[in-house]
Image (cartoon, rainbow, N blue to C red):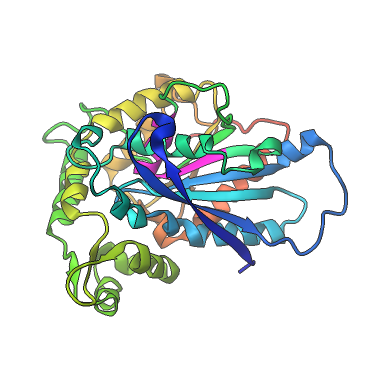
Amino acid sequence: MPEVHTVTHLVDLCHVGKPLVTMAKRYTPVRQTPAPQTPSVSSITRNTVTLIFMHALAHHKEIWEPVISRLFALEILEEGGVSIAEIWTIDCPDHGESAALNRDAPPSVLRSGRVSQHTYGGAVLALMRSGFIRGCAHSRLVLIGHCAGASAIVLSTTYPHSFDDIPISAMILVEPLMTHTDMAAEGTGVRAILDGRSQSALQRRDVWASRDEARAYLRTTGTWKLWNASVLDSYLTYGLSSGQGAGGVTLSYPKCHEGAAYTDLGEAQDALNRLSELSSSLPVHMIFGEDHPTPLRDVQAMMCSRAHRRNMASITVLPKTGHGAPQQSPKLVAEAIWKILVKSSRPSRILCGKL
C-alpha cells in the first residue's frame, strides 16, 4: 500500500445554515519523486483530481479507506495518467465518530430524529466552503457516494449557490437507490425488499461486551461476513462506540434510525427528481453490482432511463458483487472509479451508457 498522509478536520455546517458539525478526513499521497516535467495548467486541471467520498446509511467515512488505498496504488502503477491531488471522506453528522458531537442537536434540524440525506449533502457543501480543500485550484472536483451518500451528493446541489463554491466536475454514484413512491408502493417487490432491510436492521444485535466479541460475531454473521477484512476492521473501530459498561460497545448509528430510514422514501424521490435535472448538464456516472433481485434491477434501469431525461455519462456493472460493493469488493470499486477518472481526463466525453 502506498504511503499516505491523513489529517482530520472538524467541519461546521454553519456554512449551510445548520447547527451541526462533522468530521472530515483528508488523504494525500507521499510523493517520492518530483514530476519530470511541468505540464500546462490546462493539462493539470484535466488530469488532476480531488475526490470527496460519502458513505452509505449506518456506515462511516473510513469505510472507504480500502478503496482509497487502491486508488493511490493505481496512480503509481499507471504513472502519467490521472494524478490525485487529495482525497476527502466525510461523516454524515450522526454517523461514525461524528455521532457523539451531535447528540444534543435540536430536533428541528433532524428528520424523525436522524440527520437527513439533504443535511448530509449540506455537510459536503460545508466542507467545500470551509477552506480546507487545497487541491481544487488546478484540479477537477469529483464527488463519489454510496447509496444514501449518493443521494446526499445529488441533494447537495439543491442548496443556494454561493459565488465562491468549488465547481463540481462530475459525480460517481455507487449503488444509488433512488425511486418514486409508485414503484415502491405497498405490495410491490421493491417495497418488500425495503421492508425486509428495515426489519433486518431493527432485529439485529447491537450490543457486545467488547470489540473482540463484536469481531467474532460480525465476521460470521449476515452481510458483515461478506466484507473485505480491512473494511470490517475499519467498521469495528469507527462503526462501533463505547459506552455499554466496562469495555462494552454498541452500533454508532442506532438500529432504530437505520430501520426507519429504509422505509422513508421521500428523499429518494427528491434525489431522483434532481438527478433528472443534473444529468443533462453534469457528467454523472453509475456503478452497480450485478447481484440483485429483479425489482432492484428495474429500479436501476429506471434511474438510468434516458426517456426520463436521466442521461448517464457511463454505467459500470461489477461482477459477483451487490449493493455492498464498496465493503465486499473495494478493489473492484476502486478500479471502476479509476477507469472513469482516466476516461474523463481525455478531451472526448464518455458516451452515454446503457444498463
Whether 255 is among the magenta residues is: no
Q: Is residue 101 above or below residue 353?
A: below
Residue 124 relative to residue 70: left or right: left
Number of labels in the image equals: 0
Q: Position of residue 135 (x, y in %)?
A: 65, 43
Q: Position of residue 114 (x, y in %)?
A: 23, 42
As drawn, which residue projects farthest toward the right? 37
Q: Is residue 147 above or below residue 320?
A: above
Q: Which residues are magenta?
A: 142-156
- Residue shown at 30% from the left, 73% from the top: 219
Image quarter in which the N terminus is found: bottom right
Q: Is residue 168 above or below residue 258?
A: above
Q: Position of residue 332 (x, y in %)?
A: 51, 57
Of residue 42 and residue 135, the one placed in the foreground of this image is 135
Q: Position of residue 71 (x, y in %)?
A: 60, 56
Of residue 317 and residue 22, the one placed in the foreground of this image is 22
State whether residue 289 appears in this view: no
State whether residue 141 appears in this view: yes
Residue 226, quarter of picture = bottom left
Q: Is residue 40 above or below residue 221?
A: above
- Residue shown at 25% from the left, 74% from the top: 214
Residue 78 relative to residue 165: left or right: right
Residue 239 relative to residue 35: left or right: left
Image quarter in which the C terminus is found: top left
- Residue shown at 75% from the left, 56% from the top: 79
